[in-house]
Amino acid sequence: VKVLDWLQARTGFRDARRVLLDEELPPGTGWFFTLGSVLLALLGVQILTGAFLTLTYAPTPDHAYDSIRYIISTTPGRIVRGLHHYGSSFIVIAVVLHMLRVVAFGSYKSPREATWLSGLALFGLILAFSLTGYLLPWDQRAYWATVVTINIAKLTPLAGEFVAGILRGGATIGALTLTRWYSVHVIFLPLGLIALVVLHLVLMRRHGISGPVRARDGVPQAFYPWQAARDTAVVSVVLTVLAAFAWNGAPPLEAPADPSDATYVPRPEWYFLGLFQLLKYFPGKWEVFGAMVVPGLAALFLVLLPWIDRGPERHPRKRLAVMSVVAAFFIAVAALTALGWRDSPSNRVTSSWTLREIGGRAFVEAAGCARCHAPTGIADPLEQASTSRGPEWLAGHVIDPEMIAPGLREPPPPRRDEREVAAMVAYVQRLSRQPFIPVSSELQVAGKIFARYCVGCHKLDGDGGTEGPDLSAAGSKRDRDTLRRLIADPVSVNSDAEMPAFAKRLTPQELDAIAAYLAAKK
Amino acid sequence: VAIDRRRALALFVNSAVAVIGGALTTVLGAFALRPPRAAAGERWVRAAALDDLTPNTPVPRVLVLSRANGWYRERARETVFVVWDGDKSLHALSATCTHLGCQVRWDPKATNFRCPCHGGVFDASGNVVAGPPPRPLDRIEARLDDTGTNVLVRV
């Protein structure tokens, strides 16, 4: 106690406590007024988890993806990234609820217009956080969403290319974009955020909390512990739900960013889906309306709200005009988001392994890759092998490990069969995102046969050549014995068949395995 | 009664803050302070061909070692001196001075290792002759491979 008294004499810390906690709140301040504290807590979690993630994250195209994979390879890392990932969604939801509360209670009215404006600026900053953070994992989702973002920025009248250049940092989206967005995400935006949060709170304290829409009788109560208990209760619930979401980590990483992939369908974070959907209604040269004018007008409406909705009346039932406009606005955004959700297919990879990948595993095992690619070996374990260098690099390495990783002792023999190599690459790429579930030896045999022969002409579950028929539902037309005969000697089943006979190339067991697999595809 | 209610609420707020802070501290601490993943086990690495060696003279060889450092696999370079008596006896000495980690050099005239940093001197077997080093140079196991032409060291 003596030490504390000395500290009080020298610093006056007890006065700070009084200023921070003993604010008198108007009677009737209740549960609706806890949302600001929820936001403060969520922002605190973001800042903490974000700061800790930078301990291990590397903002370069070569390492960003691998460093995040490394982070989520341990339980604490998985949880920390999960908190940061889901925290951003929680913040957006809390911001919207906080804004709706302020609108419904008319809390932006004189003299609190500046508080409202600083809140809107904070909302803008939070969306900027989300956009910049989305790129950092450098997977397909991150890369292609950023391509779309920067192309939208290009629609800026007169200065489109200039703005896009600032966002890109370089001629294309690459290393310079990643360092730039990283720096903005972890230095510039947080500084702005902290400054604006302080301003928002100072303004809130200066004018006092707005309180219930009709002043009530009673004595003002101190913030601590009366309102603080309500805040703490709601914050505890919200953080518990957030922890439940984060427990299993963020959604899995997609494949590493691949600018050459023409098939990827970009999909933004869910709270941008409304804006994304809006663009679809403004084709061609009208696009700038969907991208800038409509959102700009909406933002302008929010900025002007305290001057549109003047007068001291705060009760929502006495402000029906404003309330209905805001409700329509909110419903429109929600509807656009729902439509966008329905319209944009998610690129969720199928959870089951494809037959080619299963075959690739059989080749990888036969080639003895695990002799070096093991936890105690001279190369990365296969599960952690870097796939961010792209499929060509992997194929080159599989074909001739010595060439691409010189200095190996006892290099394994080069491999020549390009279909086997392709299957091995497919397996390793998949393995980097999802652990392998052991399969029966018959399925492994079928995988090898498919990956070595069938895949050249036939598609199966979206993977393979197009010369022959798609095999994804082969079993619905023919039974197992017919399929076996068809593969062994196609002409015996279908006199027009162009497929070569495989009776001599495959053993009876191999024919059985592939026919059984295909017969089960219905 | 009001005082009790006030106390109870304060207790609730303070303990909730402690629980939330404790949970965050635990998970963030476990994330930041977790021990690095166990290093790869020791293994035999080729250091030289037997033809490269000179009997009774330590020969510096640079090993290129593949080491995992988090998500990054680095090709670390490390110098060892291979010592061979021209017959059966074969071992290697680490080039890292046991004082503060500078790299020692072999002085063929004086037939000793000298550390350029603080004047440590080691004899040809790695024993301290002069200067501040607290212990001899680290000894590394070495052997010939099955063909009898390559020198392997255990690192």
Image (cartoon, rainbow, N blue to C red):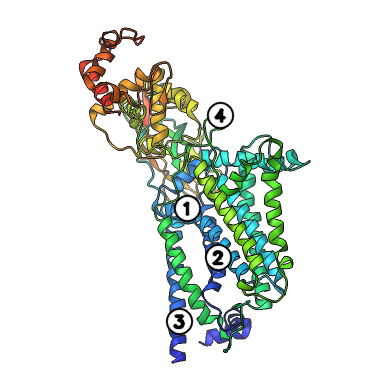
Please report whichever mark, 2 or 4, sits nearer to the chain's N-terminal start.
2
Please give the residue where the numbered disc 3 appears in the rendered image: B9
Q: Residue at x 60, y 78 (%)?
A: A211
Q: Position of residue A355 (x, y in %)?
A: 34, 28
Please report whichever mark, 1 or 2, sits nearer to the chain's N-terminal start.
2
Q: In the displayed structure, would residue A324 be above or below residue A332?
A: below
Give me the chain letter of mark 2.
A
Quarter of the image for residue A104 reads bottom right
Q: In the displayed structure, would residue A433 be above or below residue A221?
A: above
Please give the residue where the numbered disc 4 appears in the rendered image: A260
Separation of residues labelled 3 and 2 (CA atoms): 21 Å
| SS at circle 4 | loop
Query: Tags 3 and 4 in contact by the CB under 8 Å rule?
Result: no
Please give the residue where the numbered disc 1 appears in the rendered image: A81
Separation of residues labelled 1 and 2 (CA atoms): 19 Å
Q: In the displayed structure, would residue A61 be above or below residue A106?
A: above
Q: In the displayed structure, would residue A512 be above or below residue A354?
A: above
Disc 1 residue crowd, few under 14, some 14–19, many 20+, Cα 10 Å: many
Please give the residue where the numbered disc 2 appears in the rendered image: A39
Separation of residues labelled 3 and 4 (CA atoms): 59 Å
Disc 4 residue crowd, few under 14, some 14–19, many 20+, Cα 10 Å: few
Tell me if A442 is positioned left or right of A37 in this view.
left
Dot 3 amino acid type: Leu
Query: Tags 3 and 1 in contact by the CB under 8 Å rule?
Result: no
| SS at circle 3 | helix
